[in-house]
């Protein structure tokens, strides 16, 4: 079975669209991306916060925007996002990378 190739330029294009909501500047322009790896449809992104005390809601938003944007790229199966240099990094990383909830079909009630 062949693995669909992920276009690096499209991944980079998606990341360049992510804007820091606090300052209104793309994160790429602020050189916040530290690592970008793509292997067999899995994308790993590591970036650092603008400051250690960046409001957690903004750091979480950036992480979620990265994940959502990259999941829309053809061939991407999963995205793992890690923020570093933030006092709340562990919780943000846990939140953004947790697996989606599984839905359990409702059980019928006996008649």
Image (tube, rainbow, N blue to C red):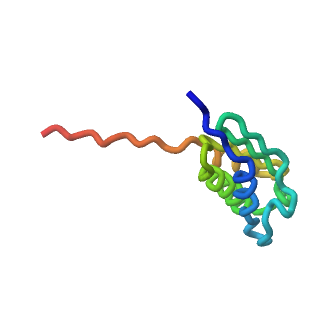
Q: Residue extending furthest bottom?
A: 24
Q: Residue extending furthest top?
A: 1
Res 26 quadrant in image? bottom right
Q: Position of residue 8 (x, y in %)?
A: 74, 47
Q: Position of residue 13 (x, y in %)?
A: 73, 58
Res 5 quadrant in image? top right
Side of 67 relative to 23 (left or right): left
Residue positioned 56% across, 27% down in the render: 1
Q: Position of residue 52 (x, y in %)?
A: 85, 56
Residue positioned 76% across, 65% down in the render: 20
Side of 17 relative to 72 (left or right): right
Q: Residue extending furthest left?
A: 111
Residue positioned 82% across, 60% down in the render: 28
Which sits in the foreground, 44 or 83? 44
Residue positioned 72% across, 62% down in the render: 18
Looking at the image, residue 34 lies above or below residue 14: above
Say which quadrant the C terminus sits in: top left
Report the number of discs. Answer: 0
Q: Position of residue 109 (x, y in %)?
A: 20, 40
Which sits in the foreground, 100 or 7? 7
């Amino acid at each position: 079975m062949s693995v669909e190739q992920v276009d690096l330029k499209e991944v980079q294009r998606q990341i360049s669209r992510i804007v820091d909501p606090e300052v209104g500047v793309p994160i790429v322009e602020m050189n916040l991306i530290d690592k970008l790896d793509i292997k067999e449809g899995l994308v790993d992104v590591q970036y650092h916060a603008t400051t250690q005390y960046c409001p957690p809601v903004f750091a979480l938003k950036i992480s979620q925007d990265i994940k959502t944007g990259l999941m829309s790229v053809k061939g991407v199966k999963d995205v793992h996002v890690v923020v570093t240099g933030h006092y709340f990094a562990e919780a943000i990383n846990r939140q953004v990378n947790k697996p989606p909830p599984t839905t359990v079909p409702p059980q019928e009630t006996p008649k």
